[in-house]
Amino acid sequence: MKKITEKVLYEGQWLAVHETIYLTKNGLQLTWETVHRRRSTVGVVIVPRLMPSKRFILIKQYRPAIDGYIISFPAGLGFNDPNHALVELKEETGYTGVIKDVSPVVKTGSSMINDNARIVYVEVDEEAAVNRNPVQKLEDAEDIEVCLVAKEDARQFLLDQIGQGVHISANLWYVFGGIPCF
């Protein structure tokens, strides 16, 4: 594949839509539309786990793009700073934790967006005073419910949510859905 041209079709405050024309290895022209972040950044996807109960902290958030709610891990734009995961975790869930591991930069939706993220694993001491009565600090545009789910209950929880018309983030299904053939 070889890129021939690329032009911006639309620019908004946060995103831009590009049209790219490629030449395939067989000599055919292919047109592809993609979404680009206007401010290059590396987001954070937070995998928070309460200790000692080992429950996962998930969020149920309204998303205008799907005109509905979705269950996902907490996340946000991290500006290439994995420590920003702790800020996002506090804002979205009210919990405070400690980073235990950080992934390399990974692609999150390469078929249509040039998005990058780090997966940040966070342990949350549920017995610490700061985490006993967590209070979210949501932005005006955010509608987020916190869901605490044990790993052994997660698959059924997700299926129950689907049954109620709630969408499920693909990354949650990768982790909790299970594929019987593996």
Image (cartoon, grey):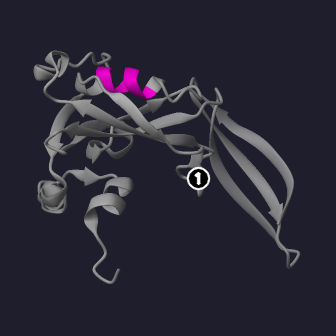
Expressed as whole percent of the image width and height from the top left, the position of residue 23 reads 85, 66
Q: Amino acid at mark 1?
A: Met
Closest to the observer, 28 or 95: 95
Expressed as whole percent of the image width and height from the top left, the position of residue 26 reads 85, 79
| Residue at horizontal 32 percent and vertical 84 percent from the top | 181
Residue 14 as seen in the image, left or right of residue 160: right
| Residue at horizontal 27 percent and vertical 36 percent from the top | 62
Magenta segment includes 147 = no
Closest to the observer, 31 or 3: 3
Residue 37 as seen in the image, left or right of residue 100: right
Expressed as whole percent of the image width and height from the top left, the position of residue 25 reads 85, 75
The residue to which callout 1 is attached is 112
Q: Residues within 10 Å of mark 1 (few under 14, many from 20)?
A: few
Task: Evaluate whether residue 157 shows in this view.
Answer: no
Question: Magenta region's main secondary structure?
Answer: helix
Image vertical order of residue 24 relative to residue 172, above or below: below
Task: Evaluate whether residue 128 shows in this view.
Answer: yes
Quadrant of the snapshot with the C terminus: bottom left
Magenta segment includes 87 = yes
Residue 160 as seen in the image, left or right of residue 87: left
Expressed as whole percent of the image width and height from the top left, the position of residue 85 reads 42, 28
Closest to the observer, 156 or 49: 49
Image vertical order of residue 149 relative to residue 23, above or below: above
Quadrant of the snapshot with the N terminus: bottom right
| Element type where label 1 sits in the image | loop
| Residue at horizontal 48 percent and vertical 25 percent from the top | 83
Q: In the rendered picture of this protein, how many numbered marks are placed on residues?
A: 1
Range covered by the magenta-colored residues: 85-91
| Residue at horizontal 33 percent and vertical 59 percent from the top | 175
